[in-house]
Image (cartoon, coloured by chain):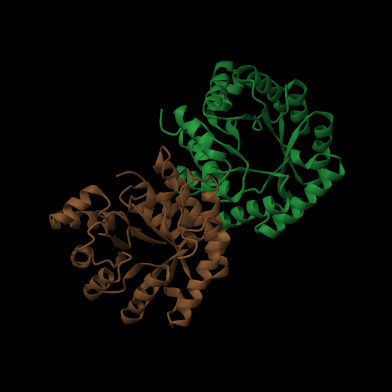
Chain colours: A brown, B green
Amino acid sequence: LLIVGEKINTSRKLVQKAVKQKDEGFIRRLARSQQQGGANMIDVNCGTFIDDEPELMRWLTELVQEETNLPACIDSPNPEAIRAALEVHKGKPLINSISGEKERYNAIVPLVGEYDCDIVALTMDDTVGIPADTDTRMRIASELIQSLDREGIDIGRVYIDPLIQPVSTDSNNGRIALETIRRLKLEFPKVHVICGLSNISFGLPERKLLNEAFLAMAIAAGMDAVIMDPTEWRMPALVAAGEVLSGADPYCGRYLKAYRKGILKPK
Amino acid sequence: LLIVGEKINTSRKLVQKAVKQKDEGFIRRLARSQQQGGANMIDVNCGTFIDDEPELMRWLTELVQEETNLPACIDSPNPEAIRAALEVHKGKPLINSISGEKERYNAIVPLVGEYDCDIVALTMDDTVGIPADTDTRMRIASELIQSLDREGIDIGRVYIDPLIQPVSTDSNNGRIALETIRRLKLEFPKVHVICGLSNISFGLPERKLLNEAFLAMAIAAGMDAVIMDPTEWRMPALVAAGEVLSGADPYCGRYLKAYRKGILKPK
């Protein structure tokens, strides 16, 4: 399972302040703590800085890679900001994201060919926005995958994000998300499925409990990449548990290694 | 979700001692603490007392019901012990269990008709023992359901137990269990699926973490009854979370009620 650390996002107040002040130490610590928690990739999002997003995205990407040597998940709908980060990125980054929205699609997809990238594709488009049901998500995913394939992009590079919606607004949203994950992996086994989990618990109390339970469920459904906070010890511990329970960890090898490293319980 | 409290089982050393000494207070406290943790039913198992099992099963059943007013899950392969408990049980008990093993089946099934019972049926038989795969479990489940239906037993009274095996002995065992649960609910929607979860983690470290993650996964797969320890706060909390996330809790009503009762976090 690919773990993308979600914390370097300027929608979080302390990150907003640190980016504004160009506080390198704060960003470095946030990157390092996520790597120590098991992140294989670090998300960078400075979307709250509308005018300076390209420059700041480049600064964040360089800083995070200098500190961790991990690839970045370049999290923006803005092609200029994405390009600015790609120009300095070392290794293979993940662009987050395109969708079925035409303008965004057309501006960002050429970058995937130009640089050596993986790409997140959201199951939404100009007509329906975020779909309420599984079938529409599957239709949009299928169109995106076919379209990217026609552009010559290896579909093993595509990460479909089924856009999990809160159970507080519709109590079927958890079931719909899990069903979508399962069907995506059945119909497109080469394509990856990535989820930002925490949206599921929006508007409810004890959100961590819900996020933890949903992480286990999503792994069992076939999710193979997750955007989450790896500095909460229980989340990477549940990834290790989830992989062994879903048959993705032969001879329980990674689970036992995680145990020996002490990451299956609080520090 | 039906929660069956598993703790009154003489394979546990302190319970063995308490039953031997007829320590009513100990058994009452164990029953009450499980009820307070959210158990809807209390399992009673004194299978280690081979000669006195019927008499002790009757004693335990009366005591547990006097203390909690909950139905008992009468946990024994011994028809005499089951009958002794049924004679004193008030309300509708759950017999745990029959299987495809002929002698056991023939001796216990008449009791289901004679008393007003629900019944656990294990997916094993005389020929294969405990099956290694999903298909054989499905075949045995199907034969048991058809056979009970022919006896005139309402199949809504049947709880199939797919006999979860440890991932430590075969790392596919978690996947096989989840797939069996899912297929049972798809092919026999009226039949219940019950699991004893803790076997999944046998032989591995940090068993609670594995049991918790597997509880969430099994609820998402469609399990609707579970034999577990409800005195560990996180287990009933995960049941509440699991139901809301799997679409089994309209308007998140039970989850919010559980929150207000304070059971979603440690006491």
- Total labels: the figure holds 0
Q: Say which quarter of the image contains residue B77.
A: top right
Looking at the image, which residue is at 67% across and 23% down? Answer: B61
Residue A99 screen position, x and y as percent: 42, 67
Q: Is residue A111 visible?
A: yes
Q: Is residue B22 left or right of residue A65?
A: right
Looking at the image, which residue is at 26% across and 50% down? Answer: A12
- Quarter of the image containing the N terminus of chain B? top right
- The residue lying toward the viewer, choosing from A156 and B162, is A156
- Quarter of the image containing the C terminus of chain B? top left
Looking at the image, which residue is at 80% across and 39% down? Answer: B154
Residue A122 screen position, x and y as percent: 43, 64
Up-down relation of residue B95 to residue B64 (above or below): below
Q: Say which quarter of the image contains residue B121.
A: top right
Q: Is residue B128 visible?
A: no
Q: Is residue B144 left or right of residue A190?
A: right
Q: Residue furthest front?
A: A127
Residue A260 screen position, x and y as percent: 35, 53
- The residue lying toward the viewer, choosing from A166 and B119, is A166
- The residue lying toward the viewer, choosing from B186 and B67, is B186
Q: Is residue B193 left or right of residue A15?
A: right
Up-down relation of residue B49 to residue A239 (above or below): above
- The residue lying toward the viewer, choosing from A25 and B65, is A25
Up-down relation of residue A124 to residue A169 (above or below): below
Residue A248 screen position, x and y as percent: 49, 61
Q: Is residue B12 left or right of residue A18?
A: right
